[in-house]
Image: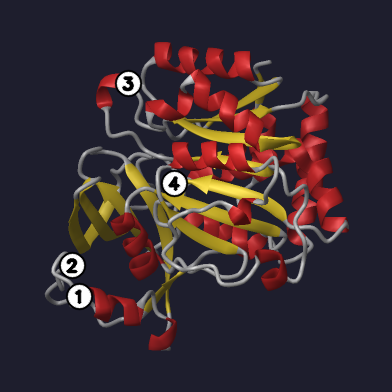
Amino acid sequence: MASDGVAKRDIVQEVDSPLTGRIIVEDVIFSEKNGNGNVLPENETFRRLLFERTPGLVQSEALLKNTENPNKSVGKAMIDEAIRHSRYRKKKNRSKTYVHVDHTYLASLYHGGMLTGLGLIISELELLVVSEKLVKTVIVGLGAGLLPMFLRQRMPFLNIEVVELDPIIADLARIFFGFIEDAQMKLHIGDGVEIVKEMTNISKSSSINDIPLRSEIPRTLDRENQCGKGTGDSKGVHVLIIDVDSDDPSTGLTCPHSNFVEESFLKTAKESLVAGGILILNLVSRSTAVHEMVISRMQMVFEQLFSLEIEEDVNKILFALPKKGHFSNDGLLEAVIRLEKLLTSSAPWGNGPNIKEYARKMKCLK
């Protein structure tokens, strides 16, 4: 995601992380068009998360809305608490306008692309929803927590586990972007590669809920009792999303870290999925050779592979299936239409992304 096209910028917070380096939270108002050429609502304010180590790349972007109720503002109590900690500094002249993040809106184009890939497993999703089973979803990489929050609101049939390596990023997501946990949304602090390996090793005899993860909120109740619904096949994951940045530019990868595209990890990821599951991976690299290398490895490991290039961004979304489906271009569009129907059955789509348009751009690589 390009970072130009900003007409006004206000630095909300800066903090140094031992793992990520300098992290910046800023509020911006774009000119009529941002750097991607997208027409944006006039005078709308967006909150963004940036890493100093990757200049020119916005990690997360959220639409802010004003609210007259301070209790509904983004992390009001948590901001007050965080300011008392030395790693957060109170900004002078901070605006007293109360705002909240609109979690029904996905500002990042590639998030809409990721969502579109769920059409590839629409039959599995429909079956689970009709059976009143929760869809096990694991997201590696929290960022500002915008994708998990959107999915939680728009797809109440998901049982979401989020994994984040850096606890400071988790704090910022809660404080400044309104990320919250509940019975169907849990955050774990840990190494995503190792956690997926644990999932695979334990899933043969246990549910994902039994995996000994280092979570910031202890689990005192069984998840199925909390939710009031069982999950689907307890021995695997239905949706695995990899959306993490890389701290090693020498690999040519901006996203994900090279560990997540090693053949050994890809095999582990495949084993963690149920037969009707899907791996969704956000690939960011300006190297054609790196793109070809990652795609080649995924083609060797998975039975079917699709890609979606986000023209306005540098992102390429890869969708890998452990079991081969049968999708023509028309068939894929029909599947996404069914997905849209499923999504709108629980809440109006409103500002949701145009997933049918993304579906037309998807390509089958294997």
Up-down relation of residue 82 to residue 319 (above or below): below
Check disc 2 and report the residue beneath it: 88
**Mark 2: which amino acid?**
Tyr
Q: Residue at x 54, y 15 (%)?
A: 297
Residue 261's spot in the image, x, y percent? Answer: 47, 24
In which quadrant will I find the C terminus? top right
Query: How far apart are the two marked residues, 4 and 2, measured between alpha carbons?
Result: 22 Å
Residue 183 falls in image quadrant: bottom right
Check disc 1 and report the residue beneath it: 83
Query: How far apart are the two marked residues, 2 and 1, measured between alpha carbons?
Result: 5 Å
**Mark 4: which amino acid?**
Gly
**In front of the other: label 4 or label 3?**
4
Task: Kindly indicate whether the residue at mark 1 contacts the one at mark 2 (C-beta within 8 angstroms).
Answer: yes
Neighbour class for label 4 at 10 Å: few (<14), some, many (≥20)? many
Q: Which disc, if any, is residue 252?
A: 3
Q: Is residue 358 visible to us here? A: yes
Check disc 4 and report the residue beneath it: 141
Q: What is the secondary structure assignment of the residue under circle 2?
A: loop
In which quadrant will I find the N terminus? top left
Residue 98's spot in the image, x, y percent? Answer: 35, 81
Neighbour class for label 1 at 10 Å: few (<14), some, many (≥20)? few
Pick the residue in front: 113 or 293. Answer: 293
**Mark 3: which amino acid?**
Gly
Q: What is the secondary structure assignment of the residue under circle 1?
A: helix
Task: Kindly indicate whether the residue at mark 4 contacts the one at mark 1 (C-beta within 8 angstroms).
Answer: no
